[in-house]
């Protein structure tokens, strides 16, 4: 199972980081970032198959692909923002992490406006 490999990689990296943190904190931070990127790359491979399945379902349901595309972008932004913010927090830069999270929220709201507008238009059409 791939999840066992991911967890194993995380545990091994954590042990190295704990051992290195007192001796060479800069190398410990690099090990943390490299491990995070490696795990992200491993997981990203799974995302393409998930997107394919969602596209198939959306086609069969007759959902406008623009909505699905926007939702997938929003999910992607959320994952990337969380990843970046956690790296900053690990480095002790919680102020920068907060700014990254704020930027992510603004980006998500910006992308959600067309969906919210379409939903409100639908509600207005349904109401007498």
Image (cartoon, rainbow, N blue to C red):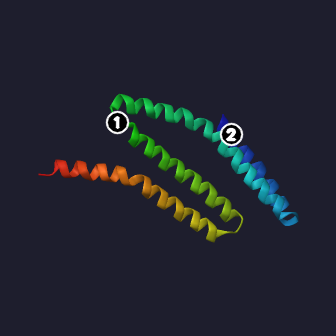
Instruction: Tell me the element at label 2.
Output: helix
Callout 1: helix, strand or loop?
loop
Point out the tag, 2 or 1, that comes first from the N-terminus: 2
Residue drawn at the location 62% of the way across and 54% of the way down: 83
Question: Is 31 above or below relative to 94?
Answer: above
The quarter of the image holding the N terminus is top right
Does 107 sit left or right of 20 as displayed?
left
Residue tagged by mark 1?
Answer: 63
Q: Observer-nearest residue: 124 or 41? A: 124
Residue 49 coordinates in the image, percent (x, y): 54, 32
* Along the line of sight, the residue nearer the viewer: 97 or 70: 70
Q: Residues within 10 Å of mark 2 (few under 14, many from 20)?
A: few
In x, y percent, where is residue 98?
Answer: 58, 67
Label drawn at residue 106: none
Give how far across and how far down residue 10 sits, in percent: 72, 49
Residue for badge 2: 4
Q: Is residue 82 above or below residue 68?
A: below
How far is mark 2 from mark 1, CA to CA?
36 Å
- Relative to 73, say whether 46 is above or below: above
Q: Is residue 115 left or right of residue 3?
A: left
């Amino acid at each position: 199972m791939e999840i066992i490999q991911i967890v194993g990689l995380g545990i091994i990296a954590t042990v190295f980081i704990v051992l290195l943190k007192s001796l060479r904190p800069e190398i410990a931070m690099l090990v943390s970032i490299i491990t995070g990127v490696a795990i992200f790359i491993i997981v990203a491979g799974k995302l393409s198959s998930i997107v394919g399945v969602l596209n198939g379902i959306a086609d069969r349901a007759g959902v406008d692909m623009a909505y699905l595309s926007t939702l997938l972008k929003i999910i992607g932004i959320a994952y990337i923002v969380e990843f970046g913010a956690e790296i900053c927090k690990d480095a002790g830069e919680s102020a920068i992490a907060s700014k990254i999270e704020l930027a992510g929220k603004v980006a998500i709201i910006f992308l959600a406006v067309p969906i919210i507008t379409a939903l409100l238009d639908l509600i207005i059409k349904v109401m007498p």
